[in-house]
Amino acid sequence: MFPARIWREIPQRYRLEANRCPQTGEIYFPPRLVCPEGKCVELEPVKLAETGTVESFTVIRVAPSAFTDEAPYPVGIVKLDDGAKMMCQIADAQIEELKIGMKVKIEFRKIQSDGKAGVHAYGYKCVPVRD
Amino acid sequence: MVGIVGYGAYIPRCRIKVEEIAKVWGADAPSYKRGLGLQEKSVPQPDQDTITMSVEATKNALKRGPHVDPKKIGAIYIGSESHPYAVKPSGTTVAEAIGATPDIHCADFEFACKAGTEGMFVVYGLVKAALIEYGLGIGADTSQGAPGDALEYSAAAGAASFIFGNDKVLAECNETFSFMTDTPDFWRREQEFYPRHGGRFTGQPAYFKHITGCAEGLMKKAGTEPKDFDYVIFHQPNGKFPQRVGKMLGFTPEQIEPGLLCPLLGNTYSGSSPMGLTSTLDISKPGDKIMLVSYGSGAGSDGFIFTVTERINEVRDLALNTRYMLDNNKRYIDYGTYAKYRGKILTAE
């Protein structure tokens, strides 16, 4: 896990910074340099909503090495309230309580650590809204 | 007028009961509950640490300070004894996450359980000196107690964040005072995983001496006495010490109760008394006078006097209040899960 890669992705992983094509209105997350629809390169920065709904999910039971301690854990596709969709871990949720249509909010969490001596990678996960 | 313009707290969802820890070590749970004045404590999950909790508490502070542009926050100080890195600041990550970089001063503070109020103390001074427009003081910890030690029953996780400024102030800071001596009551040596402590030595010459010294000095400086305050918050290493030191100083249990979170939260170290302040602000009314006195082993106390303004009524409900987070959405875990979450199990690399 390279520190430079983590550093490059800080705007989207920490602050949910996306961009939008002024011609088509399409939101891209992670941000794109060129809109694939109209080939527009003047994309506008937008900050995504921090609440949304689970559109689909799966449960990872055989996890990649950095995540074996967390298995089984859910990963979902979340439609945010501004229409953008993202894939992320669903934290703070028991597997039996997961439902399509479940309301979630974004929380800042540790995503993974590079062994015992490497860097920590932080970013967004979603958690069920119970308030 | 300089004071708090936004505040917020964060408490992880998981809890472990005193009985669950006691049964593993063959200890008498009722004795521990009675002795510590504690029923359960918060536990961070593996993806929660001082940085993540600081970000969430600060997001809540920004909800209650909606006029604050993060780009105008000129300083961020996080007090903790569980910074995720030995070398690399926690504050840079929190500042990036809230969009406050790059024109900002940042430092991580350590002073056992009073590192959080140190951050508040310094940003208050910087705002008052007009060196910055807004400043963030954060207290957060995922504290550890050695397995089987008395500290394991209380060492908990949580964070509180305060934005200081001079416009739309919700609690004016009227006075500050600090009291400090070299007292080795609790420590953790370099490379050591768990802290050590001096047992009963942590009481009279440490906690009680410094809190009473700070509170008395603060009241003398401000020309006030206990009856002038609506609420008071002391550091909460357990559920009993704050009540006892309050009685020694002449405060009533009613003045202490709103900010006393420890019986259900545990000791969140650098977050402890700052979280008590968030809980007290949640129920305060304009005109209320609040005293806050922290304590950090080693040893010292920071004291503050705040007067709540009309602004509190506009912003109080813009974020979840601290008692709500403490009382709701809890998930109780067993000792095995707790040991895994807290890294107490030796695993192959």
Image (tube, coloured by chain):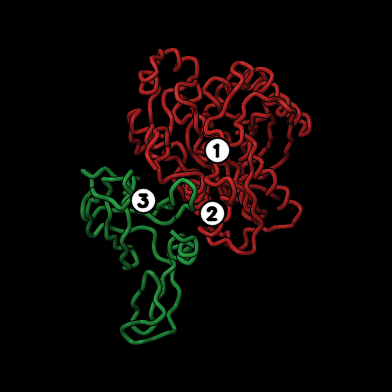
Chain colours: A green, B red
Identify residue for label 1: B271
Residue B124 is labelled as none
When the figure is inspected, residue A51 is found, relative to residue B205, above or below; the finding is below
Type of amino acid at the residue the image marks with label 3: Ala
The front one of B311 and B318 is: B318
**2 and 3 marks in contact (CB < 8 Å):** no
Residue at the (36%, 20%) spot, across then down? B24
Q: Position of A103 compared to B99: left or right?
A: left
3D distance between C-alphas at marks 2 and 1: 16 Å
Q: Position of B37 compared to A131: left or right?
A: right
Residue B94 is labelled as 2
- The reply to whether label 2 and label 1 mark residues of one chain is yes
3D distance between C-alphas at marks 2 and 3: 23 Å
Type of amino acid at the residue the image marks with label 1: Gly
- Secondary structure of residue under mark 1: helix
- The reply to whether label 2 and label 3 mark residues of one chain is no
Residue at the (36%, 87%) spot, across then down? A39
- Pair 1/3: label in front: 3
Identify residue for label 3: A66
- Secondary structure of residue under mark 3: helix
**Residue B17 visible in image:** yes
Type of amino acid at the residue the image marks with label 2: Val
**Residue B316 visible in image:** no
**2 and 1 marks in contact (CB < 8 Å):** no
Structural crowding at the residue carrying mark 3, measured as other residues with C-alpha within 10 Å and reported as few (<14), some (14–19) or many (≥20): few
